[in-house]
Image: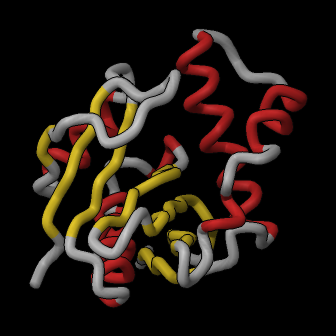
């Protein structure tokens, strides 16, 4: 029997680094409409702010399916009320098996435990699977709370009380 386990993990552990590389390769490749090179991935991960994905400024989790690291995600504390969901990723061959749902539940719970009441995020319009995931979990479009070259739509959700 196969199972999922989602646990907090250092953003720079070997498994987390590999998953973050895969995440960046996919989102960059989809944006550029070609595979990202190793050099481009290295450049994109340099100075990406992942070092903030640690308490008290955030958190990071790795999802394992039957022990294999195949998913990751994090959140950043924005202010006393809000956290920002970031780097949600499930390797393509493991999608549709419930792992992304568990990532969101775990990260939302971690943010709520820090006393935060709202989770927000930004994404691109072409990341249809991600947008569908967020909408299924009760995220609704909100006004832009930040700006940047890869931000096209913003979502928010009140965390459970």
The x and y percentages for residue 82 are 31, 66
Q: Is residue 155 depicted above or below 105 in this figure?
A: above
Drawn side of residue 8 relative to residue 78, left or right:
right
The x and y percentages for residue 33 are 58, 10
The x and y percentages for residue 6 are 47, 77
Q: Is residue 3 depicted above or below 138 in this figure?
A: below
Drawn side of residue 71 relative to residue 102, left or right:
right
Say if residue 61 shows up in the picture.
no
Q: Residue at x 15, y 38 (%)?
A: 141
Q: Residue at x 29, y 86 (%)?
A: 115
Q: Is residue 128 depicted above or below 116 in this figure?
A: above
Q: Which image quadrant is residue 19 in? A: bottom right
For the rendered model, the colour scheme is secondary structure
In the picture, the quarter occupied by the N terminus is bottom left
Drawn side of residue 15 relative to residue 119, left or right:
right
Q: Residue at x 36, y 58 (%)?
A: 100
In the picture, the quarter occupied by the C terminus is bottom left
Drawn side of residue 79 relative to residue 25, left or right:
left
Residue farthest top in this picture = 33
Q: How many marks?
A: 0
The x and y percentages for residue 150 are 49, 25
Say if residue 14 shows up in the picture.
yes
Q: Nearer the viewer, residue 137 or 124?
A: 124
Q: Which image quadrant is residue 122 in? A: top left
Residue farthest right in this picture = 39
Q: Residue at x 85, y 38 (%)?
A: 42
């Amino acid at each position: 029997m196969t199972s999922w386990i989602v646990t907090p993990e250092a953003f720079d552990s070997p498994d987390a680094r590999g998953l973050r590389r895969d995440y960046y390769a996919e989102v960059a490749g989809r944006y550029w409409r070609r595979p990202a090179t190793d050099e481009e991935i290295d450049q994109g991960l340099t100075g990406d702010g992942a070092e903030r994905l640690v308490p008290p400024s955030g958190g990071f989790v790795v999802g394992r399916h039957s022990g294999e690291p195949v998913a990751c995600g994090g959140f950043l504390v924005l202010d006393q009320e809000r956290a920002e969901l970031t780097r949600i990723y499930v390797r393509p061959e493991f999608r549709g098996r419930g792992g992304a749902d568990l990532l969101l539940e775990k990260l939302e719970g971690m943010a709520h435990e820090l006393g935060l009441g709202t989770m927000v995020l930004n994404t691109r319009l072409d990341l249809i699977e991600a947008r569908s995931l967020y909408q299924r979990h009760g995220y609704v479009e909100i006004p832009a709370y930040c700006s940047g070259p890869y931000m096209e739509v913003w979502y928010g959700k009140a965390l459970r009380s």
